[in-house]
Image (cartoon, rainbow, N blue to C red):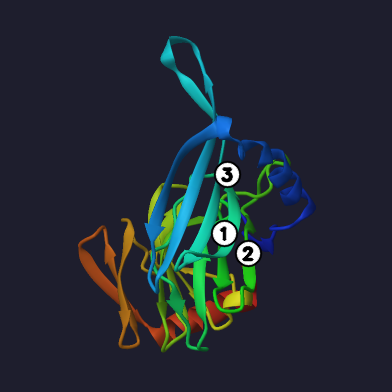
């Protein structure tokens, strides 16, 4: 696929133009569904999803655009709100308790990338990678889509579970020492283990990361090995 670009395109001119072009969705006429998701630490997320659906002949329809308004609450108090475009709303269930004593809420503002909010200071960091080479009509190319997150306080490593282009399930591991300016260089367990199958997270404990290959065969790497590979990738800048 070529060289992967770690450049953050969030808040770039092109990204801001895209966001402005999608704001029309936040209108009652595009209402799709709404719900509330309970999180840890007494937090909850209230989301309202909007979808621009064009009806075609013979009962077919095309989704032209989709977005959501998301509100993070704690004990009925609004803590933070944001909009998410380019994908349906889904989120993470747990507030991360970091080694530095702060708590972080992970979330998406787009289908790609990841954002973190310090729920105590309300500082936020949004990251959307430029990804693999793409045509000029798109803000970014393909990258890893994150569905679940596991953080290890002892090692400051973070494991992201997700998929590459919705084809291969993988566990990507990175350094999470600085949540509001984290190192975006992630190593792929799929690549490291030369797997022919999907990789699934099992656990991160006792200085080892355990994964399941195709949901069956257990394999693991030590925290020291993982950190060494992350450092190598960071240095190379691949």
Lower position in the chain sequence, tag 3 or tag 1? 3
Outermost residue, front direction? 76
Task: List the residue tagged with mark 3.
Answer: 86
Residue 64 in view of the camera: no
Q: Nearer the viewer, residue 193 or 124?
A: 124
Identify the residue at image location x=31%, y=83%.
205
| Badge 2 or badge 1: first in the primary sequence | 1
The residue tagged with tag 1: helix, strand or loop?
loop
Instruction: Please give the count of numbered marks on the rendered protein.
Output: 3
Q: Find residue 13 and report its horizontal and vertical position in percent.
A: 79, 52
Q: Residue at x 40, y 74 (%)?
A: 41
Numbered badge on residue 126: 2
Residue under label 1: 113
Q: Secondary structure at mark 2?
A: strand
Q: In the rendering, which numbered label is found on residue 222?
A: none
The residue located at (66%, 45%) in the rendering is 134
Badge nearest the viewer, 2 or 1: 2
Side (left or right) of 103 relative to 192:
right
Q: Are marks 2 and 3 in contact (CB under 8 Å)?
A: no
Q: Dots 2 and 1: beta carbons under 8 Å? A: yes
Q: Quadrant of residue 93?
A: bottom left
Residue most toward the right?
Answer: 13
Q: Residues within 10 Å of mark 2 (few under 14, many from 20)?
A: many
Q: Position of residue 19 (x, y in %)?
A: 69, 46
Q: Nearer the viewer, residue 70 or 143?
A: 70
């Amino acid at each position: 696929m070529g060289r992967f670009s770690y450049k953050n395109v969030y808040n770039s001119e092109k990204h801001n133009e895209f966001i402005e072009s999608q704001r029309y969705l936040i209108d009652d006429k595009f209402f799709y569904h709404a719900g509330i998701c309970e999180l840890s630490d007494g937090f909850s997320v209230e989301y309202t999803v909007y979808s621009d659906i064009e009806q075609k002949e013979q009962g077919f329809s095309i989704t032209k655009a989709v977005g959501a308004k998301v509100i993070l609450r704690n004990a009925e108090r609004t803590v933070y709100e944001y909009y998410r475009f380019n994908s349906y709303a889904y989120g993470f269930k747990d507030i991360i308790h970091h080694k530095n004593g702060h708590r972080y809420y992970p979330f998406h503002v787009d289908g790609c990338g990841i954002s973190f909010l310090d729920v105590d200071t309300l500082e936020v960091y949004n990251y959307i990678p430029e990804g693999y080479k793409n045509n000029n009509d798109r803000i970014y190319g393909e990258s890893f889509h994150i569905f679940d997150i596991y953080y290890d306080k002892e090692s400051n490593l973070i494991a992201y579970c997700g998929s590459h282009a919705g084809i291969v399930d993988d566990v990507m591991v990175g350094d999470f020492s600085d949540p509001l300016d984290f190192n975006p260089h992630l190593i792929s367990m799929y690549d490291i283990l030369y797997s022919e199958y999907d990789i699934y997270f099992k656990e991160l404990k006792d200085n080892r990361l355990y994964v399941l290959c195709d949901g069956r065969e257990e394999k693991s790497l030590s925290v020291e090995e993982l950190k060494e590979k992350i450092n190598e990738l960071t240095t190379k800048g691949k």
